[in-house]
Image (cartoon, rainbow, N blue to C red):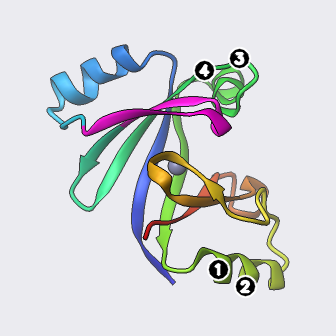
Amino acid sequence: MLEKIDHIGIAVKDLGQALKFYRDILGVELAGTEEVAEQKVRVAFLPVGESKIELLESTDPEGPVAKFIAARGEGIQHIAFRVRDIEEKLRQLKELGVKLIDEQPRYGAGGARIAFIHPKAAGGVLVELCQRS
Ligand code: ZN
């Protein structure tokens, strides 16, 4: 079961520049930033109600966010759904033959356990499953 939209990941070229819009113009609070080495990104967290905006700035030209921006420009890169039991969810999806990027959960920003579903299985949207506990 999906509990809620945990966050929306937005690929940006420059965190400082993006914060001028989200924080300074829209007035969303910046809760913090974190570098996630495994994903080669620096992430800024901006809570909005029960969900968050995560601004993603690449730290490596070969990283997934840099490649995304090179191919499609800045913009929404993924949507993350909160799940209670990520292993169980991945097992179900595998049984259904859904194409996954991550067969096993890995660690994402904020210590969450995450796994990506392939956009080809999700109408062109990169979907992340996210368990926090
Ligand atoms: Zn994410």
Q: Which amino acid lies under the numbered mark 1 shown in the image of this protein?
A: Lys
Q: Closer to the observer: label 4 or label 1?
A: 4
The residue carrying mark 3 has its beta carbon less than 8 Å from ligand 1: no
| Mark 1 surroundings within 10 Å by alpha-carbon count, few (fewer than 14), some (14 through 19), many (20 or more) | some
- Circle 3 sits on which residue? 61
* Left or right placement of residue 132 versus residue 104 in this view: left
For the residues bearing labels 1 and 3, Cβ distance under 8 angstroms: no
For the residues bearing labels 1 and 2, Cβ distance under 8 angstroms: yes
* Left or right placement of residue 74 versus residue 65 in this view: left
- Circle 1 sits on which residue? 89
The residue carrying mark 2 has its beta carbon less than 8 Å from ligand 1: no
Q: What residue sits 82% from the left and 65% below the top?
A: 99
Q: Which amino acid lies under the numbered mark 4 shown in the image of this protein?
A: Thr
| Disc nearer the start of the sequence (4/2) | 4
| Mark 4 surroundings within 10 Å by alpha-carbon count, few (fewer than 14), some (14 through 19), many (20 or more) | some
Count of labels in the image: 4
Element assignment for label 3: loop
Q: What residue sits 60% from the left and 20% below the top?
A: 59
> Distance of mark 2 from mark 3, alpha carbons?
34 Å
- Circle 2 sits on which residue? 92
| Disc nearer the start of the sequence (1/3) | 3
